[in-house]
Image (cartoon, grey):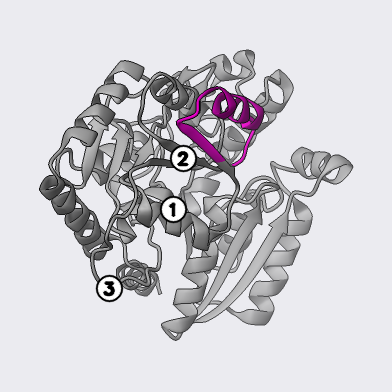
Amino acid sequence: MKLLVIHTLYNVRGGEETIVENETHHLLEAGLDVKTIFFSNGKGFKAMLKFIMLPFNLFSFLSIKNTINEYKPDIIHLHNWSFAASPAVILAAKWANVPIVLTIQNYRLLCPSATLFHNGAIFHESLNTRFPWKAVFKGVYKNSILMTFWLAFTVFLHKRMGTWKYVNKYLVHSEFVRSLFLNSDFGLREDQVLVKANSTASNNEKVAANSGDFFLYVGRLNEEKGISQLISAFANSDHKLVIIGDGPLLKFTEQSAEKSPNIVFKGKLPIDLVKKNMQEATALVFPSIWYEGMPLTIIESFSVSTPVIASKLGAMTDMITDGVNGLHFEAGNVADLQNKIDNWKNFPLEIKRQMRENARETYERKYTPDRNIKSLISIYEELT
């Protein structure tokens, strides 16, 4: 089987790039003939030009059209289409009569915010409208009415053109996200939207022994990740918190760590050191206050047998079973998070050990690369 993978790179590397690279690597290992095309949004004038061409990037259309003619793929897998790739790549696939699969990593098709999050809160206003005027006038994308309108117009235009219906299968990472799409005004059929989990490789073959007494946060340092609430929960406690990451709230995080001796900020670390810290932590804390799709960080934590204390929101409601492989707390509720942290510290060692075993078992049952790739190949075979 010949597979063409298309992805627009983000200016700041994130989990999506890791997912695309890992899937491509494992598909090659499984024997597929895989060709990748990566678009780049660039910066400055180039980025502005590609944003203007978002409704239909002729250069991207011709690039994919020519690649299809030369490579003759059996199937196309599209990941991030904005901005440089644009919906034009879907039209190129339709023109060549090649089936196409689109992985959904955010909510840009439902709302120009892409996160369903605005001004510190979940934003539902775009889900059941023909055109998201409220989102536009609020400037949910970069606080810009004009840029928000252009994003909304692009999605709306291709709804009217039928472009989004040309996608044979949409792959989402949780039943929660599937439900959001099917109950929105986007107009997909139930059989078009499939749930396929993310995955990560693991070098461990057994439950890892915990050797640390600290809690760990790994991720972007921004508002929707709940970093402010996390720091508030630990600022006046004796529990040790280690933070690994980078982002807009970097200075805030550094200053908070300076004020609180129990908070240690390590900045951005390579993945091997991240996993080492994960394995040593007593638990990973995941305080996100927006609808996460399927956080790779949680899967990585499970892969090294570390339970997760997470917001009961979005995909985290499915990924974590309270009292089995971690704990839930009310999203954004600092007092409830503090209570769960206190509870965790007071658990007997036997309960913590059992949760570590359960975390690893969850990983092996749901999130190994082998399971992920078998599921993906099965979807491809159904369409070819």
Give the alpha-carbon distance from disc 1 to disc 2, as whole Å. Answer: 9 Å
- Badge number at residue 205: 3
Label 3 crowd (10 A; few <14 / some 14-19 / many >=20): few
Query: Residue 157 location in percent, x, y?
Result: 61, 36
Compare residues 164 and 2 and report the one nearer the observer: 2
- Amino acid carrying label 1: it is Asn
Q: Which residue was labeled with disc 1?
A: 277
Location of residue 290 by image quarter: top left
Seen from this angle, which residue lies furthest bottom? 31
Location of residue 328 by image quarter: top left
Tag 1 and tag 2, C-beta contact below 8 Å: yes
Quarter in which the C terminus is drawn? bottom left
Compare residues 178 and 341 and report the one nearer the observer: 341
- Amino acid carrying label 3: it is Glu
Answer with left or right where residue 334 lies relative to residue 90. left
- Specify whether residue 261 is painted magenta: yes
Residue 291 at least partly seen: yes
Query: Residue 292 location in percent, x, y?
Result: 41, 38
- Label 3 element class: loop
The residue range painted magenta reads 246-265
Q: Residue at x 44, y 21 (%)?
A: 235
Residue 78 at least partly seen: no
Give the alpha-carbon distance from disc 3 to disc 1, as whole Å. Answer: 18 Å
- Badge number at residue 321: none
Q: Sequence order check: which comes first, mark 1 or mark 2?
A: 2
- Badge number at residue 242: 2
Answer with left or right where residue 31 lies relative to residue 379. right
- Label 2 element class: strand
Q: Sequence order check: which comes first, mark 3 or mark 1?
A: 3
